[in-house]
Image (cartoon, rainbow, N blue to C red):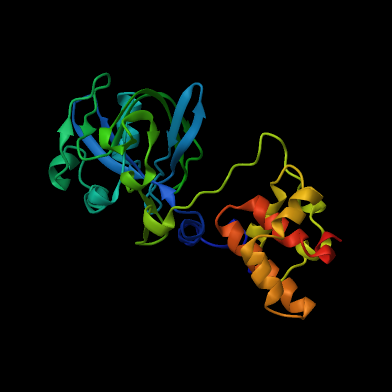
């Protein structure tokens, strides 16, 4: 059973808490900005993402404060000086990043308060954060207000001018290949919660083939209705361009694991179950073709 809520039936504060728990983890932009007095500001925003490659566009959104409808210093700054640096946040600086969100007065430098190190940018006026693994210098193309009440977003549309990143993030010194486990990015969740992107939290999913897969509708019914295979397992099976041919299936019968399964029982249902479990294991290792051969060895699975 699912609960249902309409935004107009709860307070903006309640909706805010609810949605931030549901939508995440959200990437964090630690935004450095500057005002016309040359006073620097540093503040994190998790209403943030990449929206275009050509042109290269990032967008973050400072909300008007819910309690008093006031604007955040970052929003005031980008209206005055249309340049920012978006610094990505990893685990090493997550506590300092959180502290920088404190509501200091506009003349207080959050670099100093948070202990983060400002370094001169190559193109824009705001400083970069030295400790950040990735620093992105941007020109503010536009600011789009989404409303005039507390909680209303303001889309700050940023064109990327230059990207700086730590050399040790690359794979074999190839600047076009990044090792995600080395960045150790963190994401924002609801309340006081964050997520950390490393170790077992990172996993690969093969993108759909350039040649379109067969889809769920072409998976034989006995496989589609399996209580052993999950929706994720079936999606991997659906991503194959075409089913294995009969000769491939026959050849696969000589596989030692398959032989062991057939020798383990004289009960067809038990064998079928073991074949499904083995296919599931193969799918977890992204051995989709072998998983299909395993399933199709049982002729009933072809129906």
Q: Residue at x 31, y 29 (%)?
A: 84
Relative horizontal placement of residue 31, taking residue 12 as reference (left or right): left
Q: Residue furthest right?
A: 303
Q: Residue at x 35, y 27 (%)?
A: 79
Image position, residue 156 (x, y; %): 42, 32
In the image, residue 266 sits, relative to residue 31, either above or below, namely below
Evaluate whether residue 138 shows in this view: yes
Image position, residue 202 (x, y; %): 43, 53
- Number of labels in the image equals 0
Q: Depth check: 287 or 46 in front?
A: 287
Relative horizontal placement of residue 291, taking residue 161 as reference (left or right): right
In the image, residue 300 sits, relative to residue 136, either above or below, namely below
Relative horizontal placement of residue 201, taking residue 294 as reference (left or right): left
- Image quarter where the N terminus lies is bottom right
In the image, residue 8 sits, relative to residue 153, either above or below, namely below
Image position, residue 123 (x, y; %): 27, 18
Q: Residue at x 46, y 56 (%)?
A: 20
Q: Depth check: 208 or 279 in front?
A: 279
Q: Residue furthest top?
A: 123
- Image quarter where the C terminus lies is bottom right
Image position, residue 289 (x, y; %): 67, 50
Evaluate whether residue 108 shows in this view: no
């Amino acid at each position: 059973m699912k609960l249902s809520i309409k935004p107009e039936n709860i307070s903006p504060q309640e909706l805010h808490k609810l949605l931030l728990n549901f939508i995440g983890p959200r990437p964090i932009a630690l935004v450095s900005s500057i005002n016309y007095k040359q006073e620097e500001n540093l503040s994190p925003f998790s209403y943030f993402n990449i929206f275009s490659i050509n042109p290269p566009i990032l967008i973050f959104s400072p909300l008007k404060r819910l309690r008093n409808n006031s604007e955040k210093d970052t929003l005031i700054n980008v209206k005055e000086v249309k340049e920012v640096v978006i610094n990505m946040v990893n685990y090493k600086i997550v506590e300092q990043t959180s502290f920088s969100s404190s509501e200091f007065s506009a003349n207080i430098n959050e670099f100093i308060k948070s202990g983060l190190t400002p370094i001169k940018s190559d193109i824009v006026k705001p400083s970069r954060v030295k400790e950040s693994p990735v620093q992105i210098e941007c020109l503010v193309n536009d600011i789009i207000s989404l409303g005039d009440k507390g909680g209303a977003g303001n889309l700050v549309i940023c064109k990327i001018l230059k990207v700086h990143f730590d050399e040790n993030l690359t794979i074999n010194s190839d600047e076009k290949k990044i090792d995600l486990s080395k960045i150790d990015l963190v994401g924002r969740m609801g309340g006081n919660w964050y997520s950390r992107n490393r170790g077992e939290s990172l996993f690969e999913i093969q993108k759909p083939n350039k040649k379109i897969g067969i889809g769920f509708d072409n998976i034989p019914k006995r496989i589609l209705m399996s209580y052993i295979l999950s929706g994720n397992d079936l999606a991997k099976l659906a991503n194959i361009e075409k089913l294995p041919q009969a000769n491939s299936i026959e050849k696969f019968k000589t596989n030692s694991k398959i032989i062991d399964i057939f020798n383990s029982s004289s009960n067809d249902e038990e064998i079928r179950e073991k074949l499904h479990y083995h296919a599931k294991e193969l799918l977890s290792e992204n051995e989709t073709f072998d998983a299909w051969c395993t399933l199709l060895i049982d002729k009933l699975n072809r129906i």
